[in-house]
Amino acid sequence: MRLLLIITFLIPTFLFAQDDLLDEIDTDSIGTQYATAAFKGLKIVNFESTKLVAKGDFTFIVAHRFGSLKDGFDTFFGLDAAVTRLNFIFGVSDGLNFGVSRSSYQKIYEFSTKYRLLRQAKNGFPVTVVGFNEVLINTGLSKDNLPGLEFKNRLTYAAQLLISRKVNDKFTVEIAPTFYHENYVAFDDQENSQYALGLGARYKLGKRWSLNADYGWHLNRAESSPYKNPLSIGVDLETGGHVFQMHFTTAQGMNTNTFLGQASGDWGNGDIFFGFNLSRTF
């Protein structure tokens, strides 16, 4: 496990050095024409997009997921059972971001890095590739229920490779191979190391509007698990320095391990969660 962590966090350093060399090779008198505005939000819905915060910018994101709509007036269609995530992201450079967040769902703290490896360019590389790594601390686990609980049991490690292509001015697609390791799992037949594939897309409806969707395919879910693969649909609205994302999803949790591993909703019976992300860049 220690070796995995060392490799995971050294990858960005190696690849940034390689990327600098590639930038020098690709630069000519005209300049490389890179694809821009593939995504307006830092997330598609649940999955990270290949967009990064610009150098020196600070982005603050407030995200809400309300309770299930199927509960109706008992919870005012989920408004009484909301969870909140506060996320702070800083652009160290145009290709490197650091983030920290806290979610009321299981009281999870997250520390993340996001870094660009390759950029889609006209008559050049066909896709944009971004890496995303995070360490999650579940402070909601209780020693009253788990007497042998240690700090290491609260930790989850995640790594994603985000690969997007801006097909045209309106349409962008993304795939996101994902690995995460939970030191504590709730089911005996669930492996600690888990694998998933994310699929996402954005379609631009107008100058400031877009339709977004993503889906997470968990590849080694335990047979005893009641959870399902998350499917999410939403819209983005850009208003100056704000990006407002509204969506419906089958996952209430907003961290990688919770929306991939603990999605409980079902579109078929109306068991879905309304939510939004509001981001502001300073």
Image (spheres, helix red, strand yellow):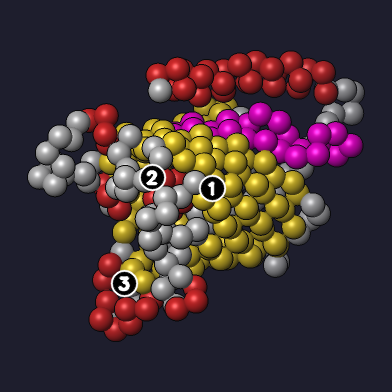
Q: Point out residue 86 in the picture as x, y percentages from the top left corner.
A: 36, 48
Disc 3, SS: helix
Q: Nearer the viewer, residue 194 or 27?
A: 194
> Which quadrant: the N terminus?
top left
Which residue was labeled with disc 1?
A: 219
Residue that appears at 70% across and 62% down: 204
Amino acid at dot 3: Leu
Q: Which mark is residue 79?
A: 3
Residue 26 image offset from top left, x and y in percent:
83, 23
Identify the disc placed on residue 190.
2
For the residues labelled 2 and 1, the Cα–Cα distance comes to: 12 Å
Q: Look at the numbered disc 1 and give the secondary structure of its residue.
A: loop
Residue 280 visible in rendering: no
Residue at far bottom of view: 73
Between 169 and 131, the one lying in front of the other is: 131
Q: In the image, residue 3 lies at what x, y percent?
A: 45, 17
Within-10-Å neighbours for mark 2: few <14, some 14–19, many 20+: some
- Of circles 3 and 2, the one toward us is 2
